[in-house]
Amino acid sequence: MSGACLLPVAGVALDGPADSELAERWAVYEAEARKTVLDLQIQRAIATGIDADGHTVMLTSLNPLINSWFVLEVDGVSYHLENPAPEEVTVDLAEDGSLALGEYGMVENCRPWADGEMDAARAAGLPYAPVCGQRLYLRNRVAGNRTNKEAVVDFLRDNVWFGESLVGFIKGTFYEDAYMESGETFDAAAAGDAVAALGKAALDRAPGMYASIGFDLIGVEDRVVEAGAWYAVEDTPGIYASAMQPGMIANDILNRPDETHWLDGVERQADVYLVAFDLNEFEIGYERGTDHPRLDWSPRPWGAGRADWLPGPDGFDRPDPLVTVGMLNPAHADRVAAVFTGGFKRAHGAFRASDKAETNYGHHYGFLSHGVLMSKLHPGLSTIYVLDDGTIGMKTWTEEDAGLLPRLRFARQNGVPLIETDPETGEGVPGEQVRSWLGGNWSGSAEAELRTLRGGACMKSVAGRDFLIYAYFSTATPSAMARTFQAYGCRYGMLLDMNSQEHTYMALFPTDEENDGFAPQHLVSNMRYIDDTSNSGAVIPRFVGFSDNRDFFYLLRKEE
């Protein structure tokens, strides 16, 4: 690239790096040295100027192709700005040193730092404070909500020298199967009509079963569904739900040798709830929480997998000058269709064994939000991603995929695949590490005896249409997860998080006028206790109504 104008608005163009500068940035990116998060943004574009009052102004577009996040610096003070409409509104620096916001060929200028607007926005304490006539949002540092259980666990890990072992003991002693559900089964004729579009899971038996799914399902009475069938969710077009138990899976899948561990009697009877999203109807985004995943070192890597003279595996342990708020931008609240928690915290988001523990600094799970890389994406890890053209995918990351970095809107890695695509048949088969407790970095006991609540996601194609499926396993090992995703015809699947309903939280937002698209329905009813309530008793949903310390995914209904 030469220093060409990247954004088509009048004023001082945000200039991309020349070839020589690009080479220098790659050298910094790859160096084993202290850095800031800005050093990971190879394509960042910078414009500088002096405004009418003599203020020195610098505007950095962190990824001009994505056009979402910007760092504005005025007389050395930094502000993290978000453009909520990156496909419609351009952001640049005008010749007079003001911000130039372009839309439909028209350009409006604003100087929120000159009239006190920026100071008021920062003092407001809101996660997102509107500026420039609500065309931009200032992202403010806020405290993210966490449950009492999470607070205790974090305290033990951070302040007690044997805290990680103690947390493991607590999980193994008190939380194994703590959320396990096993719905009563009935004659299938009472289950109601299935949604034909997604077909049915490959099961040897499909009885009617009582499902504790918290959604209103079309054609379902008394919450009795046919196992393995899909049902449309009331007032949520393009969203479907299903329930089953792994012991129902067809024997020609369940009993294939040398692919997974055999399932024990408990997880064979444990309820699994799945939610499918027709990706023709939705956009997907990802937000880091106020605290998690962290950017410092996981305690897991060792030997060549550590460089303790660095604050973190990417050369930094804080996102400054960026601000993460653990909440959906309110500009999108009217389109939100669903939210669910992301992946592992940093403490568990790296390898303690296998060659991955000693290479690439332990392969800390990477993530990227709004086109901005916050932790490097490593080859060999399961990755869910969204490209600049809206393409949504899930794959095992490779060295060659580094060329996609400028085009990525969102990405999150979390371990190795549960299911990957067989190149010969195109079908999903268990990942090669599903049976390796340490090689797969699955967490739990070294003997693979610990079943626990787990969440996961997979991709499925039906008649040329792609579906993202979120799955809630009331108690399961990775083997049960892999077999379930196979039975539902997924071509790729990955683990998300585990152990509690805070970590596997999921909610939908129906479109009916009474709910105004904002009152949530929870996948499992007890998840409602994770939400908050207003003084009037109205529900304030997690990730949408308040900031959270954890990362999350969100789905927005596409605009017509």
Image (cartoon, rainbow, N blue to C red):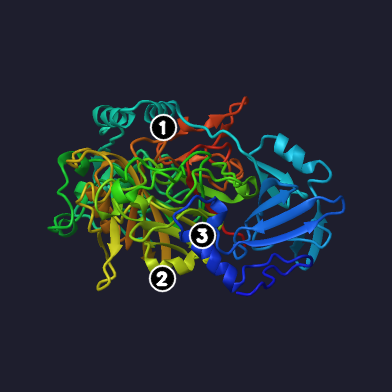
Q: Is residue 93 above or below residue 303?
A: below
Question: What kind of residue is marked 1?
Answer: Asn
For marks 3 and 1 on the same chain, the one whose residue lies earlier in the sequence: 3
Q: Answer yes or no: do the residues labelled 3 and 1 have beta carbons within 8 Å? A: no
Question: What kind of residue is marked 3?
Answer: Val
Q: Quadrant of the C terminus?
A: bottom right
Residue at the right extreme? 52
Residue at the left extreme? 257
How far, Cα to Cα, is label 3 from label 1?
Answer: 47 Å
* Front-lying residue, 2 or 309: 309
Residue 28 image label: 3
Q: Residues within 10 Å of mark 3 (few under 14, many from 20)?
A: some
Question: What kind of residue is marked 2?
Answer: Gly
Q: Nearer the viewer, mark 3 or mark 1?
A: 3
Q: Answer yes or no: do the residues labelled 2 and 1 have beta carbons within 8 Å? A: no
Q: Is residue 7 above or below residue 295?
A: below
Residue 51 lies, in percent from the top left, at 83, 54
* Front-lying residue, 83 or 181: 83
Question: For mark 1, what is the residue?
Answer: 526
Q: Residues within 10 Å of mark 2 (few under 14, many from 20)?
A: few
Question: For mark 2, what is the residue?
Answer: 464
Residue 33 lies, in percent from the top left, at 47, 52
Q: Residue at x 50, y 63 (%)?
A: 27
Q: Residue at x 55, y 56 (%)?
A: 39
Q: Secondary structure at mark 3?
A: helix
In-image side of 178 versus 548 (left or right): left
Which picture quadrant has residue 417? bottom left
Q: Secondary structure at mark 1?
A: helix
Q: Quadrant of the N terminus?
A: bottom right
For marks 2 and 1 on the same chain, the one whose residue lies earlier in the sequence: 2
